[in-house]
Image: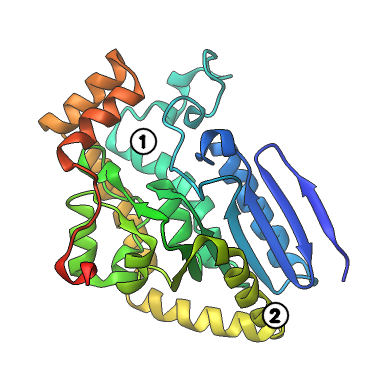
Amino acid sequence: MRKYLRSTDHLLFEAQNRIARITLNRPEKRNALSPAMLAELRDALIEADASVDVNVVILEGAGKDFCAGYDLAGAYAGYKDGEGPPWDEAAYRTHNASLDDDCWNMEQTQQLTLALFDMHKPVIAKVQGNCMAGGTDLALMCDFIICAEEAKIGFPATRANGTPPNQMWVYHVGPQWAKRLMMTGDCLWGRDAARIGLVLDAVPAAELDDAVNELARRISFVDAELLSAHKRIVNAALELQGAKTLQRFAVEMDARAHLSKGPRRTQFKADMAEHGLKTALKNRDEPFGDGMVSAHWLKK
């Protein structure tokens, strides 16, 4: 087949031997998500889905991490640090003046990540290092997750900032584990994520590339039309269980959580304004120690 290899501002895109590889390429930022990166990712996924030379997609992150979440330090605002937006903010809904503004803005982002669920071809998330917050929004929308045993997966922002606006947790691990992870913001090591079904498999870091490549290779031999049928019927089952409707409710619950006047959220916002992100995260997470799930059976 033809081989593609190109890059955009935030991604690398390669396709060969019926496998497309999309790489989040901001390793200096731990592949933190910005609106521009998410838009490029959506476009790359559509290209892979449209290509007759591609049967399966691998989504990965450059460097040590899969994705550390949304870029809270500035890029997530959609423009460079120190610059204002190229429009009159008061004329648009970008400033989240109301609950509905907040929902509307998050829905625009959610439409980009839902491309992983809606596209016809299967996507394998290859997870190493940190897969945090917005990183889990991506990974849990993929069809398979294979991670390193020492990968760190979780949504610590649930401690003070909101609830996940992409809610696929309950479909992977059930209600009790979903609540356990949401209500503490604790994270899982990759090996434990595999034990509770959050990911398909966890392997030693040195074997991660081989494990992902082998699954992609095996899937790639099946015709794209059959792969689409398999994916769409399983996803239809998820939709019959309310998966798509739940995504809308998740956004609305996150917007509601953003209105909280509780002490932890109030303190986080004050720390961000006065001291910056590093201090805000330290004060938010310090009471939770190492922040990892500790369950008796996981230690066996």
Which image quadrant is residue 257 in? Answer: top left
Q: Amino acid at mark 2?
A: Ala
CA gap, disc 2 and disc 1: 39 Å
Give the residue drawn at x 31%, y 58%.
Answer: 188
Identify whether 55 is placed above or below 72. below
| Colour pattern of the rendering | rainbow
Which image quadrant is residue 242 in? Answer: bottom left
Q: Nearer the viewer, residue 69 or 206?
A: 206
Q: Can you see residue 259? A: no
Instruction: Estimate the x, y position of residue 152 in percent, counting from the top left.
Output: 38, 53
Instruction: Estimate the x, y position of residue 162 in percent, counting from the top left.
Output: 26, 42
Return the disc, 2 or 1, that comes first in the chain's sequence.
1
List the residue tagged with mark 2: 224
Answer with left or right where residue 292 lies relative to residue 228: left
Identify whether 270 is placed above or below 250. above
Identify whether 157 is placed above or below 97. below
How many discs mark residues in the rendered view?
2
Instruction: Estimate the x, y position of residue 192 in percent, counting from the top left.
Output: 32, 66
Q: Dot 1, crowdedness within 10 Å: few (<14), some or many (≥20)? A: some
List the residue tagged with mark 1: 101
Which image quadrant is residue 19 in? Answer: bottom right
Identify whether 114 is placed above or below 239. above
Answer with left or right where residue 112 lies relative to residue 164: right
Q: Secondary structure at mark 1?
A: helix
Instruction: Estimate the x, y position of residue 89 in percent, counting from the top left.
Output: 46, 20
Q: Amino acid at mark 1?
A: Asp
Answer with left or right where residue 95 lies relative to residue 252: right
Pick the quarter of the image with the N terminus: bottom right
Q: Residue furthest left?
A: 263
